[in-house]
Image (cartoon, rainbow, N blue to C red):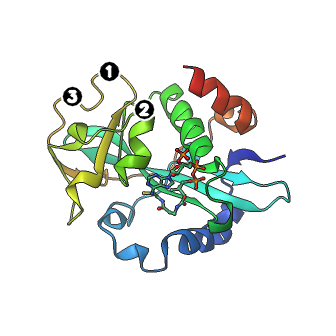
Amino acid sequence: MSHIRLERPDDAVAIELLIDRAFGSDRKAKTVYKLRAGNEPIAQLCFVVIDDEGAIVGSIRYWPVIAGGRPALLLGPVSIEPTKQGQGFGKALMHHSLAVARRLGHAAVILVGDPEYYEPFGFRRALAEKLQLPGWVEERRFLGLELATGGLAGASGPVSVPLGAKPRPTHPEAATAPPWPARAAAASRR
Ligand SMILES: CC(C)(COP(=O)(O)OP(=O)(O)OC[C@H]1O[C@@H](n2cnc3c(N)ncnc32)[C@H](O)[C@@H]1OP(=O)(O)O)[C@@H](O)C(=O)NCCC(=O)NCCS
C-alpha cells in the first residue's frame, strides 16, 4: 500500500534524481536555491511517498529561513515522479507535512510556486508581499501561509538563511504518523 514516511539519509540519491526528473536539471539556478545553499532541510518535515512496489515516487522538503525578521519555513521542492503525477500524491504530501509542521509549532511557511496549485492549501500572495527573496522570482508565485494566527504579521524585509541553521532531531510523533490516506483524510476534514 502507498504510504508516506520520513526521508532517510540513504534516500538522498534517489530523491535528487526524482527532483531532476520532475523539475529538470537546471533547477539549481533558481532563486530559492540561494536559501538552500548553506542550509539544511528540517529532518522531521522531509517526507517521501513510497508506492506499492516500494519505490520513492514523491518527496517534500522544508528549510528554516528568517522571513522579514520572523522564523519561517521555506517549502520545496515538492516533486512527484512524472509517471505518477495526478494521482493525489502531491496533495497527500502537502496535507501531511503541513499538519506535522503545525503540530510541531511552526507558525509560517513561504514558497515559490504556482498559485493555482498552492492556494487551495491556504497559501496567499498577500502574506509574502512585503518580503524580498535574494533574487528575481515571478512575484505572483511568491506565497505565504500562516500555520498560527499572525505567523507572518508584520513580516517585512529580506528572506535569509538563519545563522547556524542545523537539522533538528527526528520528532517521535512525526516518525510514527499513520499512513497517508488516513492522515490526508483527517487533514481535509479540519
Ligand atoms: C505539482 C506536483 C507536486 C503535484 O503533485 P501531483 O501528485 O501530480 O498532484 P495531485 O494529484 O496531488 O493533484 C492534482 C491536482 O493538482 C493540479 N495541479 C498539478 N500541478 C499543478 C500546477 N503546476 N498548477 C496548478 N495545478 C496543478 C492538477 O490539475 C490536479 O487538479 P484537480 O485535483 O482539480 O484535478 C507534481 O505534479 C510535480 O511534481 N510536478 C512537477 C514539479 C513541480 O512543478 N512542482 C511544484 C509545483 S509549483
User: Which amino acid, mark 1?
Assistant: Thr
From the viewer's side, name the closer residue of 5 and 10. 5
Q: Residue at x 23, y 43 (%)?
A: 128
From the viewer's side, name the closer residue of 67 and 136. 136
Specify few, some or many for label 2: CA neighbours under 10 Å numbering under 14, 14-19, or 20 or more. Answer: some
Q: Residue at x 49, y 77 (%)?
A: 24
Residue 169 visible in the current orientation: no
* Disc 1 versus disc 2: nearer the observer: 1
Q: 117 left or right of 17?
A: left
Give the SS element for disc 2: loop
Residue 76 visible in the current orientation: yes
Determine which residue is flagged by label 3. 153
Among the 4 quarters of the image, the one containing residue 149: top left
Among the 4 quarters of the image, the one containing residue 106: top left
Q: Residue at x 83, y 58 (%)?
A: 54
Quadrant placement of the C terminus:
top right
User: Which amino acid, mark 3?
Assistant: Ala
Give the SS element for disc 1: loop
- Are the two marked residues, 3 and 1, in contact with CB atoms closer than 8 angstroms? no
* Disc 3 versus disc 2: nearer the observer: 3
Specify few, some or many for label 3: CA neighbours under 10 Å numbering under 14, 14-19, or 20 or more. Answer: few
User: Which amino acid, mark 2?
Assistant: His
The answer to whether 17 is drawn above or below residue 110 in the figure is below
Q: CA distance from mark 1 to mark 2?
A: 11 Å
Q: 68 left or right of 18?
A: left
- Sequence-first tag of 1 and 2: 2
- Are the two marked residues, 3 and 2, in contact with CB atoms closer than 8 angstroms? no
Determine which residue is flagged by label 2. 106
Q: CA distance from mark 3 to mark 1?
A: 8 Å
